[in-house]
Image (spheres, rainbow, N blue to C red):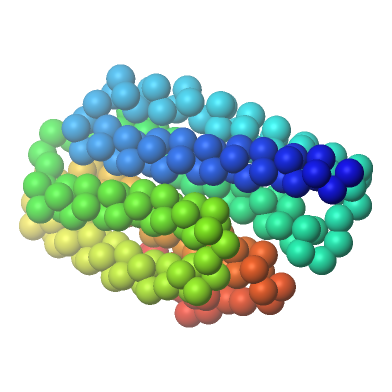
Amino acid sequence: MRQYFDDELADLDTSFKEMGLLVSETLDESVQAFLDHNRTLAQEIIDRDSAINQREIAIEKKSFEMIALYQPVTTDLREIMTVLKAVSVLERIGDNARNIAISTIHVKGSKRVAAIEKTIGETGSNVAKMVSQVLDYYVNDDAVAAETISEVAASISEVTRDIREMSIEAMEADPEQVPAATDYLVVAGYLKRTSDYVTDIAEWIIYKRTGKIVELNPGTSSFI
């Protein structure tokens, strides 16, 4: 019975990791589609969202089945609960990627601000890397490294505040830049929230490893 449980737990971990990699890639692509004004790629990302949702449902179903069948306790139960909690966070990150793609479809105005778009591109790549990193921490059961995610999230918050200020300045400088600057504000908000979600996953990794529930970002403030 123990071997069956360990095998199914390994399958669950693999499914979680695969979903995380898909979400990370989708987020990176969604930011690139926005910057390239690539509506075709944006639509593909929107269509892909249902596949991410289905993965979440399958993982949740498997987790509940394992709890019912094996009635795990202590460390085993924490591992399954971590997957249950973290997979819902991954799905929300996928939603943010979809929402950025929707912004690309609906984008208006042709006057863009290169400096802001450069910052958004760099920030999007960094946030996608955060997702990939936190997945590595999960696989390696590395609670110590997971704690460092909050520092990265804090730096993302600072950059998105800079984007907000730059966007407002662009609006004030040239009314023709208002549509684009509004889009920048929206996308930066999604990226900021995504970095917060990654921090949530890191908190569950720490719970999985130590049994302690921690708050890595107690001072998190809203973007606007």
Q: Residue furthest bottom?
A: 219
Asked if 30 appears above or below 184 in the picture, the reply is: above
**In the shown orientation, is residue 73 left or right of residue 156?**
right
Q: Quadrant of the N terminus?
A: top right
Task: Note whether residue 147 is visible.
Answer: yes
Q: Is residue 155 above or below residue 56?
A: below
Query: Which residue is at 41% across, 56% downward?
Result: 133
- Give the left or right position of residue 149, taking residue 56 as reference: left
Q: Where is residue 84 drawn, in percent x and y?
A: 70, 50
Looking at the image, which residue sits at the far front? 3
Q: Quadrant of residue 5?
A: top right
Q: Is residue 113 above or below residue 46?
A: below
x%, y% of residue 124?
30, 49
Residue 111, by quadrant, is top left
Residue 194 makes an appearance in the image: no
Q: Nearer the viewer, residue 61 or 79?
A: 79
Report x, y in % for residue 192. Answer: 39, 59
At 84% from the left edge and 48% from the top edge, which residue is drawn? Answer: 2
Residue 176 drawn at (x, y percent):
12, 43
Q: Nearer the viewer, residue 159 or 207?
A: 207
Callout count: 0
Q: What residue is at 22 percent from the left and 48 percent from the top?
A: 121
Q: Is residue 109 left or right of residue 206?
A: left
Image quadrant in which the C terminus is located: bottom left
Q: Which residue is found at the position 13% from the left and 56% from the top?
A: 170
